[in-house]
Amino acid sequence: MYDIELKNIDKKNNRISFNLSFSQKALQYINSEEMPLQYIYDVNVENVPDAILCIPFLSNFLPLIFALDLSLFVHDIDSSFLNSVVHIRNGYQKMIPSIKMGGNIIFEKEIKTNYDTKTSCLLFSGGIDAMNSLAMNDSLVSDLISIWGSDIHFNNNVGRNNTLSSIKDIALKFNKKLHVIHSNFREFLNEKKLDEQVQHCGDFWRHGFQHGIALIGQVAPLAYIFGYKHVLIASSFTKEFNPICASNPLIDNEFRYALTDTIHDGFEFDRCDKINNIFNYLEENKQAVNLHVCWQSQSGHNCGHCEKCLRSYLNCLAVNKDPRILGLNVKMSMRKIKRIYLKKTYYDDQALDRFRVLKKHIIKTYKVVPDNLKRIVDTNFENLNNRLYWKVRHFAGKTKRRIIKCFKKVRIKK
């Protein structure tokens, strides 16, 4: 009857598992070997009402319901969350107009949930975006929420423990309480199949549909227990450049349940602005941190050679800050870094915006641009997308190298 049905929630101490059934239409997007969908908290959640306990599951499946026009059934649903669903759907529709956002939620009981709100929390990955939100909201945020199963694989204990070690250190240094949520919410969905389904919209499932909303929802049981008024999630993009991304103010700021709302934080800052904010915060508190920025390595450490690691390193140099204070130890020469960055024959809108931010801050920071950053300032990356321009540039560079090589041989003979 329903494409997705929540039959019951199994709650035992700090673990909740969802007993689900699927129609054939929905089942193709589920990794059945990952059943059940489960969330493990660091506190006992048995006394949390089902209308709140089901929100982690609902938030992970809402994008699926919208994009694939599915029906979902639950017994109990929180009234505040139910009222926010239509606004969340509208947010997705505005962001991705190429897909008609449909689907519906059927329920037995709408429940108004109450609890005392006395503090706020921040979803904390340990990266630059999250650290900026901590720096700018230190007096508001008392708790940090780390989710295991988001960037580091659910079963990767070594990698996650390495990342968690840095996050624990940050929580201790800045007197914040840390909570860890452990979930297979990503592995539960067949991301490859979903990527194929939505690829025509210009993004993939994790980034364009799931990221953000699936994280915010996991906090609901903790919000009930500890009384969170706000859940903060750090922005990935800015007002100047706001592409398709499931963590978007159009969506995040509409996410509510019971007496808790969500704040998409830091949207007014670009990545170099955030570096400046973080350094001001660290200097004020006389601290250094090890941030986790890498999206390639599963070791829990920054690999030091992927695009994200190199870009974070350059963001620091662009505002004349020492990357080592953030734990960004890139063991690569600037010549090699520039060669990696400039070897492409096409730069998409995101890459062009990253260089716009770098150029803007390099020019703003330095009266005289250092030699190691000069090429980034001088290069017109839009021109690199012109095939003819790139071919001429490549030919000129090749010819120049040949002339220099011949000239060297002539000097050696003399």
Image (spheres, rainbow, N blue to C red):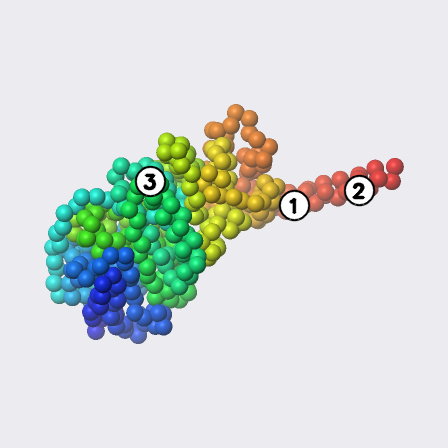
Q: On the image, which quarter does residue 30 sit in?
A: bottom left
Q: CA distance from mark 1 to mark 2?
A: 19 Å
Q: Which mark is residue 185?
A: none
Mark 1: which amino acid? His
Q: Which mark is residue 174?
A: 3
Q: Which mark is residue 406?
A: 2
Element carrying mark 2: helix
Left or right relative to 226: residue 195:
right
Mark 3: which amino acid? Phe
Q: Is residue 40 above or below residue 379?
A: below
Q: Residues within 10 Å of mark 3 (few under 14, many from 20)?
A: some
Q: CA distance from mark 3 to mark 1?
A: 50 Å
Q: Residue 208 at what x, y percent from top left? A: 37, 54
Instruction: Look at the image and tell me whether residue 248 can be seen.
Output: no
Residue plotted at (30% across, 41% down): 175
Say which residue label 1 marks. 394
Residue plotted at (37% across, 59% down): 149
Pointer 1 or 2: first along the chain: 1
Q: Quadrant of the N terminus?
A: bottom left
Q: On the image, which quarter does residue 102 sit in?
A: bottom left
Q: Residues within 10 Å of mark 2 (few under 14, many from 20)?
A: few
Left or right relative to 301: residue 246:
left
Q: Nearer the viewer, mark 3 or mark 2?
A: 3
Pointer 3 or 2: first along the chain: 3
Element carrying mark 3: loop
Pointer 3 or 1: first along the chain: 3
Mark 2: which amino acid? Cys
Q: Name the one closer to the observer, 253 or 324.
A: 324
Residue plotted at (80% across, 39% down): 407
Q: Name the one closer to the observer, 403 or 122.
A: 122
